Amino acid sequence: MTSRRDFLKTSAGVGVGAAVSLGSAQPLRGAPAVHKSVVVPVAVASGNGLEAVETAVRSVTQGGDTLDAVVEGVNIVERDPGDASVGFGGLPNLDGVVQLDSSVMHGPSRGAGAVACIEGIKTPSSVARDVMRYTDHVLLVGEGAQRFALSMGYQLEDLLTERSRRRWIEWRATMSDRDDYLTLEETGHAVPGSSRQEDYGLGLLDSHDGVRPQGTINCNVINSDGDLSGVTTTSGLAWKVPGRVGDSPIVGAGLYVDNDVGACGSTGRGEAVIKTCGSHSVVELMRSGMSPTDACLEALRRIVTFTVEPRLRNADGRPSFGVNYYAINKNGDHGGASIYSGGRYAVCRDGETRHEDLAYLFERRG
Ligand code: GLY
């Protein structure tokens, strides 16, 4: 009998190449009809990903692997203490602990890896890639994810910056009039080092209910061979219930890549994206022939339909939260859409890095 380990050993010589030829020999039905054999490399990301898309395109142009390219790109944001939505400096959960979520998908090898609720590791996207490369699993969570990361040589670090800690203390003070924490007005003292007017970089974040900041970075790339990869990484919803997992580490929700069709990722309220299998839906809509932007808009309409809870609807019955999708198809066409107007996404193509407007379903009011 051949064990899995023996099988891997005997097939090691063919590896990724075998996966590619198998995929090409049996294309899935409905892949985009027009497939240019040479594609101009393109990367798209959420609005906070200008450096990420530039890095990703530079990397694939120099012959780098598509997944390494996007992970290298988002690592910049994960390590940036100024971005309170991702990695180091991310806003913490209810208990003041930063818990991070991330997933990756590698188009050519059909690989996927993810970590959820991981603490103390600055670059969860790199750990997600290691889950894909060095285990037989797709998703590791919590303490197990952290132990795996430490076994791979990652350093345990305090991810709570002074700025995000102050922000959490201020939130705690305003959370309830029935607990034993004094409100900021009652205490008569500012939180040490705090300035209420301080810019916490939250302009980069979506506000899911007008109060709780939420942000993420998604980045997808296509190289000149038409190979695709994507990554999504986040500190999730600020002040979340400990253990809460958003869409970012859920394959098919916060990220989906099918190397025959395209790639998509999301930012915004993860619960809405999970319930509608958001990124997978966008890729399937592109498979049926929709442009990336139209596919993103249609997936957002499904979210609107699914949002029946009064607590999640505005007075006009529309969602009281934001969701954005960012997509590239197999031809290198790209697009993105948001529930409300005013959003932008980052694009790098043809040596130019810029923001483009997201398409949207509804004008933002007020
Ligand atoms: N989309 C990020 C989250 O909900 O955690």
Image (tube, rainbow, N blue to C red):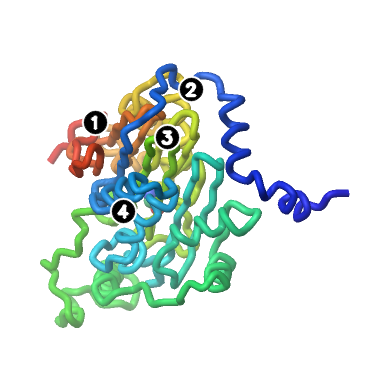
The secondary structure type at the circle numbered 4 is strand
Task: Using residue 105 as the reference point, say whether residue 184 is left or right of it.
Answer: left
Q: How far apart are marks 3 and 4 (CA)?
A: 32 Å
> Could you tell me which residue is drawn at 30 percent across and 68 percent down?
89
The tag earlier along the polypeptide, 1 or 3, is 3
The tag earlier along the polypeptide, 1 or 2, is 2
Residue 31 is marked as 2
Please determine whether, in this image, residue 192 is positioned above or below residue 160.
below
As rendered, which of 16 and 359 lies closer to the eye?
Answer: 16
The secondary structure type at the circle numbered 2 is loop
Near mark 3 (Cα within 10 A), the count class, few <14, some 14-19 or many ≥20, is few
The tag earlier along the polypeptide, 3 or 4, is 4
Near mark 1 (Cα within 10 A), the count class, few <14, some 14-19 or many ≥20, is many
Q: Distance between the residues labelled 1 and 2?
A: 24 Å
Indicate the position of residue 355 as horizontal and vertical percent values.
19, 42
As rendered, which of 273 and 356 lies closer to the eye?
Answer: 356
Q: Distance between the residues labelled 4 and 1?
A: 19 Å
Indicate the position of residue 257 as horizontal and vertical percent values.
47, 38
Residue 225 is marked as 3
Residue 359 is marked as 1
**Amino acid type of the residue that numbered disc 4 sits on in the rendered structure:** Gly
**Amino acid type of the residue that numbered disc 1 sits on in the rendered structure:** Ala
Asked whether mark 1 lies closer than 8 Å to ligand 1, one says no
Residue 138 is marked as none
> Could you tell me which residue is drawn at 34 percent across and 62 percent down?
78
Q: How far apart are marks 2 and 4 (CA)?
A: 32 Å
Q: Distance between the residues labelled 1 and 3?
A: 28 Å
The tag earlier along the polypeptide, 4 or 1, is 4
**Amino acid type of the residue that numbered disc 2 sits on in the rendered structure:** Ala
The secondary structure type at the circle numbered 1 is strand
| Residue that carries the numbered disc 4 in the rendered image | 215
